[in-house]
């Protein structure tokens, strides 16, 4: 019976029907060549058998590929769900902390800045201010020399030499720390009692301090402290009047220039008072390092206190101008007007189709 032509014709079909139940058996193209014996007498039968086995082979490969893709998608969905759950948990914990600790939010925050933008702006402005300070100190030295002032007094106020600049005794160190602490305390009292000053300070600090690390706060506090004091106290005071009049002029100039960058008149007023304190320290010690150190201490302490009171960033929402909203509403109205006839035609067609079907 096995040697009969009928058996030789049916055996390949039996093999194919059994092997098609298992998808993994059709892995290579050599499988179906081994299944289809070359001894089938009829070429047409051999061709049809080959086509049937190939169709099942390709179907098995497609099913395997589909299964693998589904498994990958399922794993991706699981990962996404896990991440989403983690974000929801963190947001809930953050909201609980916000409510329990009463974290302060910044009103009307300025557009956020990157750390690179802050670096460039700080180094550029500090370099420019330092250059102006050095040039103005040279002018002040020549002016005081012409006026016949004491050479030691001129040197103490205007010298740019390291041996004349970098000297600090215990008394000067005490004045530096005391002025820095006093300005910091005055800033905190002003923030608590003057809403306009708090609003301006929070906006400026949210833009500048938020992207920075704790280490970055040190040089951000030192660069403006050193450069500004070199110009306004170490150069402007001896260039105009090396006494209280020069300190007042320098303080007023210092305050006016602080009425910018998201700050307001309240910021300018506080800067004027702080500038007067730094000027008094400079005149009392004749050492520009004292106001430099006091300014840096005040900047650093105030930045750390502000970061402690505002640990969570405030989201910036761009302000929508009236003309932008009007233009958007016009576009929306125009699109609705254009789409109205199309919607009407669709409703008519749908109604007609429903009537025809009924």
Image (cartoon, rainbow, N blue to C red):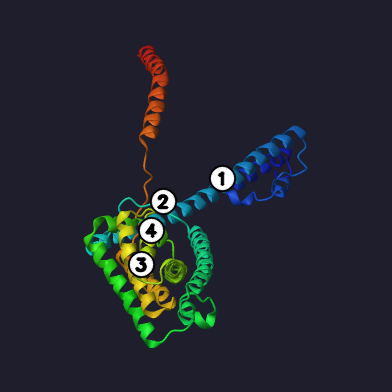
Q: Residues within 10 Å of mark 3 (few under 14, many from 20)?
A: few
Residue at 31% across, 71% down: 183
Residue sitting at x 78%, y 42%? 39
Q: Which residue is mark 1?
A: 63
Front of the two marks 1 and 3: 3
- Front in this rendered view, residue 355 or 297: 297
Q: Position of residue 296 (x, y in %)?
A: 40, 72
Of circles 4 and 3, the one toward us is: 3
Disc 2 designates what residue? 111
Q: Find residue 258 and name its label.
A: 4
Within 10 Å of the Cα at label 1, are there few (<14), some (14-19), or many (20+) other Cα atoms? few
Q: Earlier in the sequence, mark 1 or mark 4?
A: 1
Q: CA distance from mark 1 to mark 3?
A: 90 Å
Residue found at x 38% / y 52%? 110
Residue 42 image offset from top left, x and y in percent: 76, 34
Q: Which residue is mark 3?
A: 245
């Amino acid at each position: 019976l096995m040697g009969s032509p009928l058996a030789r014709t049916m055996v390949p079909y039996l093999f194919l029907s059994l092997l098609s139940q298992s998808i993994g058996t059709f892995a290579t193209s050599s499988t179906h060549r081994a299944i289809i014996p070359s001894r089938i007498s009829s070429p047409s039968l051999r061709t049809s058998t080959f086509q049937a086995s190939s169709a099942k082979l390709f179907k098995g490969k497609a099913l395997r590929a589909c299964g693998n893709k589904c498994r990958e998608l399922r794993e991706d969905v699981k990962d996404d769900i896990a991440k989403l759950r983690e974000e929801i948990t963190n947001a809930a914990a953050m909201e609980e902390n916000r409510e329990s600790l009463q974290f302060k939010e910044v009103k009307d925050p300025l557009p956020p800045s990157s750390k690179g933008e802050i670096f460039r702006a700080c180094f550029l402005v500090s370099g420019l201010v330092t250059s102006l300070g050095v040039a103005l100190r040279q002018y002040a030295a020549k002016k005081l020399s012409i006026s016949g002032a004491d050479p030691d007094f001129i040197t103490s106020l205007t010298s740019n030499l390291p041996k004349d600049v970098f000297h600090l005794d215990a008394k000067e160190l005490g004045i530096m720390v005391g002025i820095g602490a006093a300005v910091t305390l005055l800033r905190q009292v002003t923030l608590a009692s003057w809403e306009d000053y708090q609003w301006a300070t929070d906006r400026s600090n949210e833009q500048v301090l938020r992207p920075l690390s704790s280490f970055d706060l040190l040089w951000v506090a030192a660069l403006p402290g050193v450069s500004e004091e070199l110009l306004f106290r170490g150069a402007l005071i001896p260039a105009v009047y090396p006494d209280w009049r020069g300190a007042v002029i320098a303080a007023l100039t210092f305050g006016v220039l602080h009425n910018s960058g998201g700050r307001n008149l309240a910021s300018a007023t506080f800067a004027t008072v702080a500038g007067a304190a730094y000027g008094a320290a400079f005149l009392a010690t004749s050492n520009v390092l004292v106001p430099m150190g006091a300014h840096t201490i005040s900047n650093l302490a105030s930045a750390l206190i502000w970061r402690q009171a505002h640990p969570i960033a405030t989201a910036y929402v761009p302000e929508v101008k009236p003309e932008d909203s009007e233009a958007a509403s016009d576009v929306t109205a125009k699109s609705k007007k254009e789409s109205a006839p199309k919607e009407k035609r669709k409703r008519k067609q749908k109604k007609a189709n429903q009537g025809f079907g009924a």
